[in-house]
Structures are given as C-alpha cells and as structure tokens.
Amino acid sequence: MKKGFFAAIIAIFLLSLTSGLVFADKPVIFDPQGNEISWSHTNACTTIQSGLIVDSAGNPLTVGYDEFGYNYQAHMFNGTYDSADRQLDGKYGGATGDYVDDTLMMKWSDEWLANVDCNGDGKLDRGLVNGVPSGTSYGWTTNHVEGEYVDADGNLQHYTYFTKIVWVVAGGGLWGAYDVVEEIYNDPTGHYHVLYADPGLGHQFYP
C-alpha cells in the first residue's frame, strides 16, 4: 500500500538544498563522470554557526533542529512527510496526501550533504571529499518512516518502512547513480513483510 516512499522523499531532499559551484582559476578537478570542475580555494570553510549559510529559500540555517525537523549540523531530520519539503502546509509534493503526518527520520553521511560551505556559494556542500565539493551527493542516506492508516474494514493499522540508499558512481538502479542497499517494509495487517539487504550494506562510495 505504501511502497516507493524513498524515491519521492530523496528526490525532494536532493533538491531542497541544491549547492551550486563557484568557478575560479584555481585547481581543477573532475567529477566521477569526467566533467571538469573548478572551485574557489578558501582557507577555511564556512560553518552553520556563522549564520552565513542559507536554505533554498534564502533563510539562514541554524544549529540544532529547525521548525521543519532538519538538524543539518548533526546530519539528521526528524519530522513528517509534510515538513520534509521545508513547508508546513499540510501538503507533500504539491498535493494533499493521506500520509503527510506520518513520521519520517532521515540520516545521511557527510559526503551526502556536509554541514559546511567550502566553495563559498552560501549553501551546504554536496559530495565534499578532501575539502572539495562536487555538487553531487556521495556516501549514503537513510529513511525511516512510521505511520498509521485505516484499512478497508475501517480499522486503524500501523506500518513501518526503512531504506538505505548509496551513491554507486554510475549504473545504479535509482537515478542512474544510486542504489538501494537495504529496504524493510512491515505492515502485518496488510500482509507486507519485506526485507532486502545487499552484501554491500554499510559501504561508503566516493571518489
């Protein structure tokens, strides 16, 4: 009944704080696809504590949990489907859904989304490896969902869902560069009890 959660959630997560690149004439590096990336060299990365890093709407990020449930300093989110898109409007993805109030917890590695800005664009860096951001999320992210729904007989039922996604360079089954390495879906009443775990669970992939 509630399959395919992770695709929509991660899609929003990937876009919610898209980090641009600042181009300069300092060292040239290449992303995993062989594209040239130039970046502005700085002596130190900007931190969230500085108040100079903003979200996609231009609002300064703060340390600790914000009103939506994001704690970027700790690489965590504790909120709902409704607040995952950084809007408290009772909607998700632009349409009202029956799961907007279901709880959602996300965690991610520093390579997926760092808690600093090293390229000077005022956004958190993605794919930050050895002080150089690529703009692409590396590493891993997890989703843990829990909620309730009313079944066909009018009874309130409970379900849980968990997934872990990793960056795999190229050829992945998710957006061409990512793969699901673990997925657990439990809904006893709906007769769903699915467990999938890849032998690579826990590996971190980055250049």
Image (cartoon, helix red, strand yellow):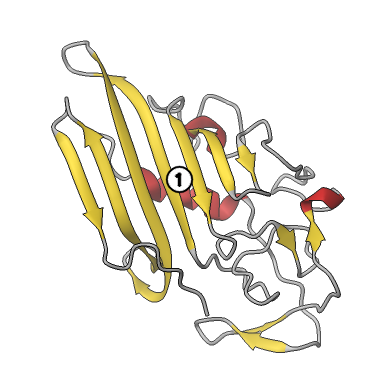
Picture coordinates of residue 188, whole percent (x, y)? 17, 29
Q: Is residue 166 above or below residue 35?
A: above
Where residue 84 sits, quadrant-wise, is top right
Question: With 18 as the anchor, is 50 left or right in this view?
Answer: right
Q: Is residue 188 above or below residue 155?
A: below
Question: With 95 as the anchor, is 20 left or right in this view?
Answer: right
Residue at point 39%, 50% (across, down): 7
The residue positioned farthest toward the top in the image shown = 154
Where residue 98 sits, quadrant-wise, is top left
Where residue 5 sits, quadrant-wise, is top left
Depth check: 104 or 204 in front?
Answer: 204
**Amino acid on which the number 1 mark rests in the picture:** Ile
Picture coordinates of residue 105, whole percent (x, y)? 48, 39
Q: Is residue 164 above or below residue 178?
A: above
Per the image, label 1 sits on a secondary structure element best described as helix
Picture coordinates of residue 24, whole percent (x, y)? 80, 82
Question: With 50 as the anchor, is 64 left or right in this view?
Answer: left
Please rate how many residues cluster around mark 1, counting C-alpha atoms within 10 Å: few if below 14, some from 14 to 19, many from 20. some
Depth check: 141 or 82 in front?
Answer: 141
Picture coordinates of residue 175, whole percent (x, y)? 40, 64
Residue tagged 1? 9
Residue at point 78%, 64% (across, down): 121
Q: Is residue 193 above or below residue 7?
A: above
Quarter the N terminus occupies:
top left
Question: How many marks do you count on the picture?
Answer: 1
Depth check: 74 or 35 in front?
Answer: 74
